[in-house]
Image: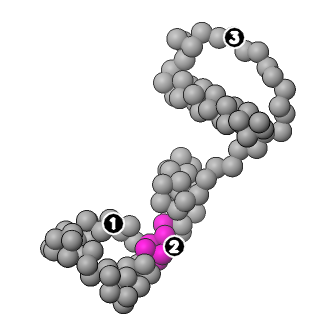
């Protein structure tokens, strides 16, 4: 369940990366490598599920970065709302969230076009 890269696996086996990549050309080696990756994902899903309540942000990070999970945003109300505020008073997390919101809004508008 290490989810290591080919370069990391080669280092673990004390061999050059190009040799490891050539080994992966053998069907039996490739099958073992692919099966190991899938078993690693299953293990990661178990851990993600177990820790989701205590560490929801970590569960989300693991899902998005290793398990190809994506957050689905649904827009139910498309009315324009004017909001005024001083961006300089926002902390870094609030600015990051605002950037994400603006990007989601732009994407939603582009998809409607």
Residue 39 x %, y %:
46, 77
Q: Is residue 57 magenta?
A: no
Which image quarter holds the N terminus? bottom left
Q: How far apart, in angstroms, are the residues tagged by discs 3 and 2?
A: 46 Å
Q: Is residue 42 magenta?
A: yes
Question: Relative to the observer, which residue lies in front, 46 or 19?
Answer: 19
Vertical relation: 51 (above or below) 6: above
Q: Residue 22, which numbered label? A: none
Camera-side mark, 1 or 2 = 1
Vertical relation: 17 (above or below) 105: below
Marks 1 and 2 in Cβ contact (< 8 Å):
no
Q: How far apart, in angstroms, are the residues tagged by discs 1 and 2?
A: 15 Å
Q: Residue 84, which numbered label? A: 3
Q: Residue 42, which numbered label? A: 2
Residue ID at (55%, 51%): 60
Task: Say which element carries label 3.
Answer: loop
Residue ID at (54%, 17%): 90
């Amino acid at each position: 369940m290490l989810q290591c890269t080919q370069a990391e696996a080669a280092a673990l086996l004390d061999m050059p990366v190009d040799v490891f990549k050539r080994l992966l050309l053998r069907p039996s080696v490739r099958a073992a490598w692919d099966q190991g990756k899938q078993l690693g994902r299953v293990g990661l899903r178990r851990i993600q599920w177990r820790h989701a309540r205590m560490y929801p942000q970590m569960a989300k990070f693991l899902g998005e970065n290793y398990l190809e999970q994506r957050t689905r945003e649904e827009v139910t109300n498309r009315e324009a709302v004017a909001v005024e505020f001083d961006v300089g008073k926002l902390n870094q997390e609030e600015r990051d969230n605002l950037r994400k919101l603006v990007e989601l809004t732009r994407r939603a508008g582009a998809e409607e076009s």
